Image (spheres, rainbow, N blue to C red):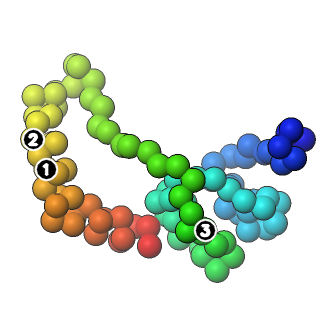
Amino acid sequence: MAKSGFDVHFVNYRNLFPFLSKGRADCLLIERNVGRHKIKQSGLKHKIVELPNVVFSYTYCFFIGTKSPYLSILPDIGNTVRQMKKEGSIQEIIDKYVK
């Protein structure tokens, strides 16, 4: 048992939500969109509740190898992502696969 009073378990990634839904764990900390996708994918939406509180947030960035054949179009990729965010395309993708 950890000093916090919590038992901490690490399980295989694909077993996280079944582990939670069967009462073998009380809570799970995972990135929101990944969690929503996994819940939807596993058919456990009626057995798991997402709390509205954000614990912490990440900034996601693209990384590309210096030997990648796509290195020369990196500015175009950045422009495309900005345009997709502005037009709402990225949110549409998230809504389609996560919600």
- State the SS at label 1: helix
What residue lies at 36% left-to-right and 70% top-to-bottom? 95
Q: Amino acid at mark 1?
A: Thr
* Label of residue 76 in the image: 2
> Residue 27 is drawn in which quadrant?
bottom right
> Label 3 to label 1, Cα distance in Å?
33 Å
Q: Position of residue 13 (x, y in %)?
A: 63, 48
> Residue 63 is drawn in which quadrant?
top left
What residue lies at 22% left-to-right and 19% top-to-bottom? 67
Please give left or right for residue 85 compared with residue 34 in the image: left
Q: Are marks 2 and 3 in contact (CB under 8 Å)?
A: no
Q: According to the image, label 1 marks what residue?
A: 80
Is 80 situated above or below 49?
Answer: above
Q: Quadrant of the C terminus?
A: bottom left
Label 2: how many residues lie within 10 Å, few (<14), some (14-19) or many (20+)?
few
> Label 2 to label 1, Cα distance in Å?
6 Å
What residue lies at 15% left-to-right and 65% top-to-bottom? 87
Q: Earlier in the sequence, mark 3 or mark 1?
A: 3
